[in-house]
């Protein structure tokens, strides 16, 4: 008998029929004698409808009240999921995030989990129930309802799995695992059986939209092994876990492409301490997500700094950068849209040389020009022309032999 | 500066525009320097939609989970109402029933309020906020969400008014007070300025759908003076309060008609102790709401018992009665639909004779046959043919001079 935490996303619980399907799935595990904790998201579309409703009431809804409002989405799903299990004769009890003992800080709409006291979860499990917990939400130490922001339900599942010391944590989604590349771009992409937290983190923060990085970070911190799998079939998914020695035999685990990128280059930045800090502090304070930052060696007391960001943020960034350029005495700045970021990821890079060379050679043979290069210990990223993104991804994928399924 | 509790029902908060209207109303009181606690219901239609959703998931949803589900209705409204106030520049904070300190027993879908610890309400009021509280809901001593059943939001408002020692409690609804009769039936009905709890109780438990009896009972018990008024205009409403001496000058406060009634007569019931108890225990255990019960003197060791109930419950009642008739050795039973109950109500009856005679005479002159008669200290009820209901109500109303507005 195991203690299993399962998480089902908004698409998996998108309507009453799908909720009954989820209940059927959960019932199977329950009948096999497992203790099951189920974390669910709001039904797909519900959160958007609630946001729309709020906007109809006032243009800038307060974050505390948005949390109060949005928390009803998951609360609806937990009640319906418990009812669906009852319909199958399975004892089940729903709990809001607050009731499940999830305490967060007080930062509304993007709260961080502070601690979990899963007493009620254990009590209801011990009484023979499936326990259904609302994802995405908790309460602060004053008892106000908070939400965890994007990807919050995954985080709830992983944090709960850690708190209840679950044997298994399953993240059910609409894809059946993590692939060596996005199968829509690379038809011969293969499913990865096992992946390390660090690789998953790099994949997650790139184009692979399976999970938000913060959930993976949390899993890594608390050593929660989890499996990403499909709620629409019974295929085994991808296991995400601490790295093992033999994982390093695979040099590159996957290749990802992040579209809709833009870059800004500030030219002639005076080469003095504190200048870069001024620039990026301003951007951070405006909550702009800066991705790659490249600065080359300076010449004649000044240098160029280039950074990438989502193209949707470009307008806001331009406005912020303009006065800064003047203030720091830089020459000027240029902005470019229409670029993508291609990355190869793999912990095997640490012990295998030549990955960069192989990547650059593959791109060169495909006649893809490299605009920027940035590397980390287990990742090499390049920015390229968006129009060449798919071709480049396919070429690089095959160059690293990812089209052939490998053992972990 | 007063402390005011206001309650707005589902129609008053039925869409974003109406929620903004409510906010405008609340803002006026706030700007006059009052402390305002606002209790709101679910937006009209929302509760029904949620019930429909539940039925799509399973045929007999568990009550605990229905409470979890339905509680989202008011939670949505409180968030939106707070947002609407923010939009007007008024500080406001929403609280669920549980957060407002409303503790109930554990009887899901029809919980009773056990106690209220309104610390958070006071804290937020003292910080200058309008406090918006979800009606209809609370939590039991285990922290499970409960709902209070029909009319629950009125109950929340009155109980909160008692708990926070409010100076004023206003129940906003879609009618602008309590009338001497239903104005749809009796066009010359007049608004009652003041009414005693007992009269309101009788009116409420009859056709006057303004409030559920339990809320009035609660108000009476805790001596909460409240006003029923319209959220769509600024007319003064009806004040409900402890009776005063001069209230007795009015013999009949109002006349009400309750439609959709049915009656069951059990004939030849053995005249032995405990027989009536057997019958009505069985009906009560099936949660059938029995209204009038009439038993006349027995003849030859047996008697007839007649009772009325809502006609929707008639089928269920028939099934229950059939075996009981056999068991207690009665002769048989007959059921009749298509009847209404007409009542005249007034604490003045206690000190004025001849009310019954006047009522019977008025009905007789209108050629309305009386099927059953039942009296209480401040009420006389008769059942009549449903087809004659409106005519009878108008006749009785005018016979008691209710068409002329009177001082309380």
Image (cartoon, coloured by chain):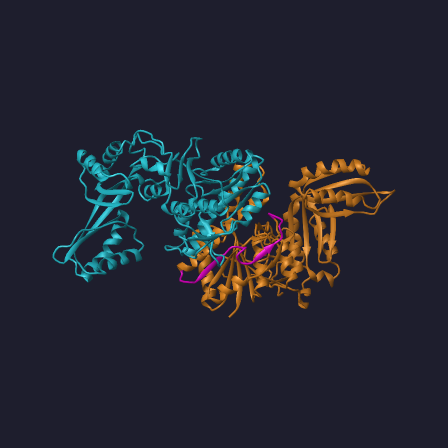
Chain colours: A orange, B cyan
Q: Is residue B311 left or right of residue B200?
A: left
From where the camera sits, is residue B267 visible? no
Residue A233 magenta-highlighted: no
Q: Is residue B82 left or right of residue A88?
A: right
Q: At which x and y percent is residue A298? A: 84, 45
Q: How many marks?
A: 0
From where the camera sits, is residue B384 visible? yes
Q: At which x and y percent is residue B53? A: 41, 49
Q: Is residue A27 left or right of residue A272?
A: left
Q: Nearer the viewer, residue A363 or A6?
A: A6
Above or below, B226 relative to A212: above
Q: Nearer the viewer, residue B347 or A59?
A: B347
Q: Residue furthest right?
A: A300
Residue A93 magenta-highlighted: yes
Q: Residue furthest left?
A: B300
Quadrant in the rendering for residue B393: top left
Q: Which residues are magenta?
A: A88-109
Q: Nearer the viewer, residue B10 or A190?
A: B10
Image quarter hosting the C terminus of chain A: bottom right
Q: At which x and y percent is residue A382? A: 71, 49
Q: At which x and y percent is residue B206? A: 31, 43
- Magenta stretch prevailing secondary structure: loop
Q: Nearer the viewer, residue B59 or B157?
A: B157
* Picture residue at 66% right of the left edge, 55% below the top: A202
* Picture residue at 25% right of the left edge, 42% below the top: B380
Q: Is residue A134 left or right of residue A87?
A: right
Quadrant in the rendering for residue A194: bottom right
């Amino acid at each position: 008998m195991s203690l299993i935490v399962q998480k089902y996303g908004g698409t998996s619980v998108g309507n009453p029929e799908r909720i009954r399907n989820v209940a059927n799935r959960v019932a199977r595990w329950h009948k096999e004698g497992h203790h099951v904790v189920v974390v669910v998201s709001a039904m797909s579309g519900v959160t958007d409808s609630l946001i729309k409703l709020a906007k109809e009431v006032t243009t800038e809804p307060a974050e505390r009240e948005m949390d109060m409002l949005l928390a009803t989405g998951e609360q609806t799903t937990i009640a319906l999921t418990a009812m669906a299990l009852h319909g199958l004769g399975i004892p089940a009890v729903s709990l809001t995030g607050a009731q499940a003992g999830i305490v967060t800080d007080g930062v509304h709409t993007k709260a961080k989990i502070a601690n979990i006291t899963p007493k009620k979860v254990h009590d209801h499990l011990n009484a023979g129930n499936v326990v259904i917990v609302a994802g995405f939400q908790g309460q602060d130490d004053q008892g106000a309802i908070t939400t965890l922001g994007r990807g919050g339900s995954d985080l709830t599942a992983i944090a709960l799995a850690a708190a209840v010391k679950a044997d298994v944590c399953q993240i059910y989604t609409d894809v059946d695992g993590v692939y060596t590349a996005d199968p829509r771009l690379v038809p011969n992409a293969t499913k990865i059986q096992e992946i390390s937290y660090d690789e998953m983190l790099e994949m997650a923060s790139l184009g692979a939209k399976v999970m938000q990085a913060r959930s993976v970070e949390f899993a890594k911190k608390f050593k929660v092994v989890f499996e990403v799998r499909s709620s629409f079939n019974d295929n085994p998914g991808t296991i995400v876990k601490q790295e093992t020695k033999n994982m390093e035999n695979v040099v590159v685990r996957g290749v990802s492409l992040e579209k809709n990128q833009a870059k800004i280059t500030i030219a002639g930045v005076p080469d003095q301490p504190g200048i870069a800090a001024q620039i990026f502090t301003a951007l951070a304070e405006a909550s702009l997500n800066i991705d790659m930052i490249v600065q080359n060696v300076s010449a004649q007391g000044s240098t160029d700094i280039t950074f990438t960001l989502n193209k949707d943020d470009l307008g806001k960034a331009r406005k912020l950068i303009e006065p800064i350029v003047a203030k720091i005495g830089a020459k000027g700045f240029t902005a470019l849209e229409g670029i993508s970021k291609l990355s190869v990821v793999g912990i095997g890079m640490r012990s295998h040389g030549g990955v960069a060379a192989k990547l650059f050679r593959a791109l060169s043979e495909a006649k893809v020009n490299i605009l920027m290069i940035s590397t980390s210990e287990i990742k090499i990223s390049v920015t390229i022309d968006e129009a060449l993104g798919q071709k480049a991804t396919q070429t690089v994928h095959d160059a690293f032999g990812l089209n052939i399924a490998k053992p972990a």
